[in-house]
Image: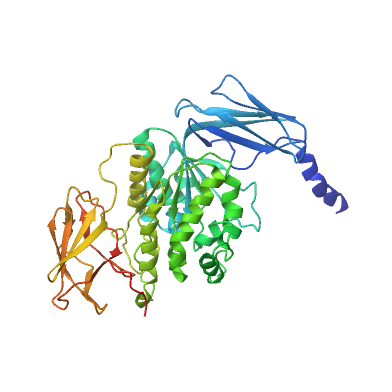
């Protein structure tokens, strides 16, 4: 027993003598194309470390510092070409094989980002028999938390096939598949989702605590055995270790948990995106999904609509875009809609148009622009409906109208021009405010001609709740 103890005790010291690297670097990985890619790791202090990619004729070297850390930058070429190798040489040699150069995206959020074929996502299950694609690579990170920011994680890169796809984010996969088909470049996807998580856990704690509202939101997170209840813990364990690794952008699908304090969600989204971009030192694109309709059982409190409202407001984040999924819910009593393909495709639409400058037609949902009153009629105008609006399956639904008494009544609505809807109710002679799909479980049928659902909205700023 004593000999075993000594071996375990001294093994980290022996390992320091060899060059080694964080888990995000492995064979079968994807490196961001046409970038200054940071490569880092550990070795004996003072040891010379040389890094060379088989795509380049010259190597790059550095010397390990007194903390046993080395870091350098290599330049990656345009996407494509045969699989490469990345060689790291110090006292020992590491050769990473089957390396591709392409586009790398981070896929983060709670369970609707995490959900996979293994969790019952039906269209992901349908992909399994034909899933193999050597030009799509996955890095699936296990759930990790920490009290302080970490410099390494766990996991390894893997080629997309029926086995690896089964446990990988379905939203992330369909997004990556669409990009791969449209851009014809390799796609690397990093899955760091955690079901049930609060946005506060994805932001460094000291930043959450800077502002009274966000601090209160963090302090009132509901305890659970299934997810962290501390600000910053997921950031420290799952985001911080990745921040030196070059990415193209980030996807986000989260918000259901933050119904406990929805008024801060807009501020927290800005704080998170600013923090992540600062950590990566890159103003990367950020595309996200508005939470889906679900029967939370607290409809009179308007918590879910309030979160959606904050998510809509957050579209003012630069280089951001929001996907609406009110039409993609198969069961309003299931918080995890069973189909994710169209969610991934809509996120890809934003990326293809905004990040990759592809001409793909309209990729934005109709969005409320303005309202004016003509007698007993409220006239609502939408943006992103240049080709026209459409009502699917019958008369328009989910419109409500109120007068000065703040009482909302179900309204009749009809499309009167390409981008204009007329809203009326015999119970409201002088309209003051209109709401659309502003409840927990809306089933709206207003779309633009491209088939994208209108964003839920309200024209008033009245106090919500009982």
**In this orientation, which residue lies closer to the viewer: 97 or 125?**
97
Q: Where residue 439 appears, x then y in whole percent?
A: 31, 70
- Colour scheme in use: rainbow
Q: Is residue 179 left or right of residue 137?
A: left
- Rendered position, 299 above or below 23: below
Q: Is residue 95 left or right of residue 167?
A: right
The answer to whether residue 210 shows anywhere in this view is yes
Rendered-image quadrant of the N terminus? bottom right
Q: Residue at x 38, y 41 (%)?
A: 177
Q: Quadrant of residue 146?
A: bottom right
Q: Where residue 385 appears, x then y in whole percent?
A: 21, 51
Q: Residue at x 29, y 63 (%)?
A: 457
Q: Is residue 369 left or right of residue 120?
A: left
Q: Residue at x 53, y 71 (%)?
A: 222
Q: Residue furthest top?
A: 57
Q: Quadrant of residue 336?
A: bottom left
The answer to whether residue 334 shows anywhere in this view is no
- Rendered position, 342 above or below 56: below
């Amino acid at each position: 027993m004593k000999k075993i103890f000594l071996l375990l005790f001294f093994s980290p010291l022996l390992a320091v003598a060899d060059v080694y690297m964080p888990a995000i670097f492995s064979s079968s990985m994807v490196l961001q194309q046409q970038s200054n890619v940071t490569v880092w790791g550990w070795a004996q202090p003072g040891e010379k470390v040389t890094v060379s990619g088989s795509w380049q004729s010259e190597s790059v070297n550095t010397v390990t510092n007194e903390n046993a850390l080395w870091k350098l930058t290599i330049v990656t070429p345009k996407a494509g070409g045969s699989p490469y190798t990345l060689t790291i040489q110090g006292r020992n040699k590491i050769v990473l094989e089957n390396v591709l150069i392409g586009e790398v995206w981070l896929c983060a959020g709670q369970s609707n980002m995490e959900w996979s074929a293994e969790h019952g996502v039906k269209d992901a299950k349908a992909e399994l028999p034909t899933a193999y694609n050597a030009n799509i690579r996955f890095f699936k990170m296990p759930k990790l938390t920490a009290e302080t920011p970490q410099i390494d994680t766990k996991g390894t890169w893997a080629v997309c096939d029926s086995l690896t796809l089964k446990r990988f984010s379905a939203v992330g996969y369909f997004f990556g598949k669409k990009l791969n088909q449209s851009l014809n470049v390799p796609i690397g996807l990093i899955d760091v989702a955690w079901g049930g998580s609060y946005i506060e856990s994805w932001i460094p704690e000291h930043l959450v605590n800077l502002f009274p509202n966000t601090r209160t939101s963090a302090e009132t997170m509901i305890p659970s055995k299934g997810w962290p209840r501390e600000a910053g813990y997921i950031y420290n364990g799952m985001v911080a270790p990745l921040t030196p690794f070059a990415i193209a952008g980030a996807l986000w699908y989260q918000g259901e948990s933050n119904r406990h304090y929805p008024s801060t969600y807009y501020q927290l989204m800005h704080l998170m995106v600013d923090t992540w971009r600062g950590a990566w030192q890159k103003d990367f694109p950020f595309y996200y999904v508005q939470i889906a309709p679900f029967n939370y059982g607290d409809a009179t409190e308007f918590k879910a609509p309030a979160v959606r409202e904050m998510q809509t407001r957050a579209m003012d984040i630069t280089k951001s875009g929001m996907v609406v999924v009110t039409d993609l819910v198969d069961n309003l009593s299931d918080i995890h809609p069973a189909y994710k393909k169209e969610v991934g495709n809509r996120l890809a639409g934003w990326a293809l148009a905004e990040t990759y400058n592809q001409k793909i037609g309209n990729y934005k949902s109709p969005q409320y622009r303005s309202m004016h009153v003509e007698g007993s009629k409220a006239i609502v105008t939408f943006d992103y409906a240049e080709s026209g609006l459409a009502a699917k399956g019958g008369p328009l639904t989910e419109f409500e109208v109120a007068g000065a008494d703040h009482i909302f009544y179900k309204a009749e609505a009809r499309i009167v021009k390409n981008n204009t809807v007329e809203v009326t109710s015999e119970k409201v002679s002088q309209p003051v405010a209109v709401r659309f799909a502003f409840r927990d479980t809306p089933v709206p049928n207003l779309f633009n001609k491209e088939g994208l659902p209108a964003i839920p909205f309200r024209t008033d700023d009245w106090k919500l709740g009982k």
